[in-house]
Image (tube, helix red, strand yellow):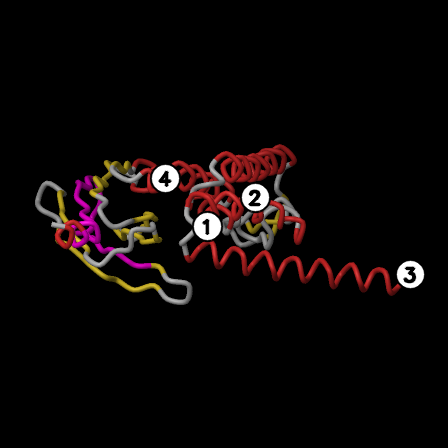
Amino acid sequence: AALMCGCQSSKVKISGRFVGGDAKNIYLEQVLPLTQSVVDSAALAPDGSYRMELTGVAKTPSLYNVIYDGERIPLLLAGGDRLTLGSVGSVIRNYTVEGSSESELLRQFYQAFVTGAKYYTPSGRCIQAIDYSHRAEDGSVGTVPDSLIKEYTAEYYRIRREQLRFIIEHKASLAAVYALYQRLPGDTYLFNGDSDVVYYRTVAEALQESYPESSYLQSLQAEIARMDARISLTSQITEARH
């Protein structure tokens, strides 16, 4: 019985229905630190329904993407999960997920962040808070009106505030780790360079309690050590100059 229980706990079942897209197949992609690879796929039925099953999944959640109609939906899957995932119309805006608390948290962050990022870069043309020039439809270079600059700048800072709020409010979740590493186009840092270490450390300390065996915690701790080393080196250089 114990053996059967262990076997069952390593399985993940995903089913649901996608309506409104042109794709006929759905794919499940495993995301590792250096590689991403498709580990399962399924054909959609005429009504858009599908079913997939994955075995050998660890009990600690790890990152996967469901790929449908050119869009990636991130999930945090753990052995034993039975997910219902689907959408009607726009995949990213409308998808829902049930059966995994971490994947649901990730949905809350991802939908808001990606929707905001697309607003921030309309039609694929990046209008950044620090770059107000744009190319008109006829190819000429013009200047973005002040009203549009204010609108996009306000949206830019709103997205970043919401990102930090999510990280702090859900610091004990692996969804917070995902949020730590997301950037708007043109951004290098989460908020303010090496001082961002405070957010990384906050999440790492919380994960020590919630997911002590997670490989993401180990990666986070290594990142914190690198950031601390850079801060220390910068401080030493500054002191030497004085």
Left or right: 159, with 72 as reference point: right
Among numbered discs 3 and 2, the one appearing first in the sequence: 2
Q: Which residue is mark 2?
A: 202
Q: Nearer the viewer, mark 1 or mark 2?
A: 2
Quick one: which residue is furthest to the front in this view? 2
Q: Amino acid at mark 3?
A: His
Residue under the image location 43 percent in, 50 percent down: 212
- Checking the image for residue 124, the label placed there is 1
Q: Amino acid at mark 2?
A: Thr
The quarter of the displayed image where residue 82 is located: top left
Q: Which residue is mark 3?
A: 242
Do the residues under discs 4 and 1 have CB atoms within 8 angstroms? no
Q: Position of residue 125 (x, y in %)?
A: 50, 50
Q: Nearer the viewer, mark 3 or mark 2?
A: 2
Q: Nearer the viewer, mark 4 or mark 3?
A: 3
Q: Nearer the viewer, residue 168 or 139?
A: 168
Q: Position of residue 8 (x, y in %)?
A: 16, 50
Q: Position of residue 26 (x, y in %)?
A: 20, 53
- Checking the image for residue 20, the label placed there is none
- Checking the image for residue 107, the label placed there is 4
Among numbered discs 4 and 2, the one appearing first in the sequence: 4
Q: Nearer the viewer, residue 138 or 8?
A: 8
Q: Nearer the viewer, mark 1 or mark 3?
A: 3
Quick one: which residue is furthest to the left in this view? 46
